[in-house]
Amino acid sequence: MSKKRIRFIALMVLTIFALTIVTGCGGNQAGQGGQKAKIAYYAYNSEPVLDWDPSVEFSNGIVVMNNIYETLLRYDPAENKVIPVLATDYTKSPDGLTWTFHLRKGVKFHDGTEMKADAVKFSIERTKKLNKGAAYIWEPVQQINVKDDYTVEFKLSYAAPLDLIASCGYAAFIMSPKVADQPEDWFAKGNEAGTGPYKLQSTKKGEEVVLTRFDEYWRGWEGNHFDKVIIKKVPETASRRQLVEKGEADVTIELPYEDVEALKKNSNVEVLTAPAFQNLFFCLNTEKAPLNNKLVRQALSYAFPYDDVVKYAMGNYATQARGAIPYGHWGHGDNLFQYKHDLNKAKELLAQAGYPNGGFKLLLTYMSGDEAEKKTAELYKAELAKLNINLEVRGMPWESQWEMAKSKDPNQRQDILGMYWWVDYASPYSWLRSIFHSENDILFNLNYYKNPTFDKLIDEANAKSGIDRAGAEKMYIDAQKILVEDAPSIFAYDKKCVWIYNKHFKGLRSNAAYPNTIFFYDTYRE
């Protein structure tokens, strides 16, 4: 696509977005007073929600769902602790198999129903029964008992870290028990049943979500808060930058890093760089030749230009990954083997695998609109060309490339899939199970990796992490040693979270456990 056409598209997107704001939402400008100052705009880089069912959504919807729904607890990475939300406190038995949560009184769902223990039981049992999305987090829960209106007891089959599970950014949401009376497609029609500060006002599938404040929210509305929140898909990076610069959007993410550096010089724009439990993998299709050969996968890992990617694609807002668990998260292995860019080693391994002259073609897909991922793929393409490997680089919407990767026929899948992973709940199991466990229903193990020894090790680590985190951590690191050796993915980089926002937008606090998520109740316009 020509630069002229890109600029044209960017201008059209910007114009349409601005007109939508003016005609449909009151013409907000950052820093204006009155009701206009009560509307927040998040120019998001992808679809805001893929599935409106809080038991099922397991992707971008984290940015929306965590403003509509709430969980029993929330994880604070800065303090490495969980904080109370719908639960005021909890206890666990010495063996880690019985957990008791005491619930906050006076909390209402958006339908007016009071939040009680029966709602907690209903929500989690519903999520377990549907068994979709991140429902796996509740697998250790054998029984949920309502002790009284504000006390709920969990019986576990093994000592899992239920406090971390209950703080998960997916599949841990508490919903109104009246959902049971609704038809199966109720959520799909744009309905919700949360306790959060904002209700769903309207949605345009794949494009925009508009939230409005819930007047009976349990934390109240004293002080300065937004009354309305608009989260809108704006895929063009140039448009997102302009919207923030002009004050027509309050905040965005995922801008090219040269833009970030330029915006630091703009007195109307703030840039916040924060830790992120988020990393980029390039999943290798291990069921399709030649990537079904471990030596070829190792060669591709050596061919990856890690330092150049960190410097030129990420603007040094990342570090080379070391294993699957990102820096700063428990279970990260500081001493794990780390592949380095070495074309001679790559050639040696290719020769051992029967490809002394390369001579094959691979398809790599990445999420269209992500400039950093695109640059990463282009840098990699140039290195593989030196090995006589032809890499086709194709940008696709996330949902489209995900569907391609889940094709039953390995030959219909891409060879390499660029995929960011962010934490479900603050446990290494979030990464290692979701991306690499050989479960029957493939969701995000888009490497199609199968190693029973690895599976057993991470399952055992998870089973003891509720009472022996140090022992579990060692097992998770040992599992990653297997993973790095087998090389089902290229562990590209651990990224930092970079927020770009208008100077009048206040209260933004980045939480690595809920990537890309703004808890809008805590923000306001100055």
Image (cartoon, rainbow, N blue to C red):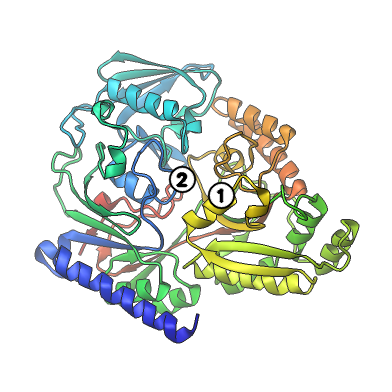
Image: 218 above or below 48: above
Q: Residue furthest bottom?
A: 4
**Residue 473 falls in which quadrant of the image?**
top right
* In this rendering, position of residue 315 left or right of residue 263: right
Q: Are marks 1 and 2 in contact (CB under 8 Å)?
A: yes
Mark 1 vs mark 2, CA separation in Å: 9 Å
State the mark number for residue 328: 1
Foreground pick, 2 / 468: 2
> Residue at the location (37% across, 82% down)?
8
Q: Amino acid at mark 2?
A: Pro
Tag of residue 273: none
- Tell me the crowding category of disc 1: few under 14, some 14 to 19, or many 20 or more residues within 10 angstroms, Cα based: few
Nearer-N-terminus badge (1/2): 2
Element on which disc 2 rests:
loop
Can you tell which quarter of the image residue 432 is in?
Answer: top right
Q: Residue at x 23, y 56 (%)?
A: 229
> Which quadrant of the figure has residue 124?
top left
Residue that numbered label 2 is attached to: 77
Left or right, residue 337 beside residue 466: right
User: Callout 1: helix, strand or loop?
Assistant: loop
Which quadrant of the figure contains the C terminus? bottom left
Q: x, y percentage for residue 198?
A: 22, 46
The amino acid at mark 1 is Gly
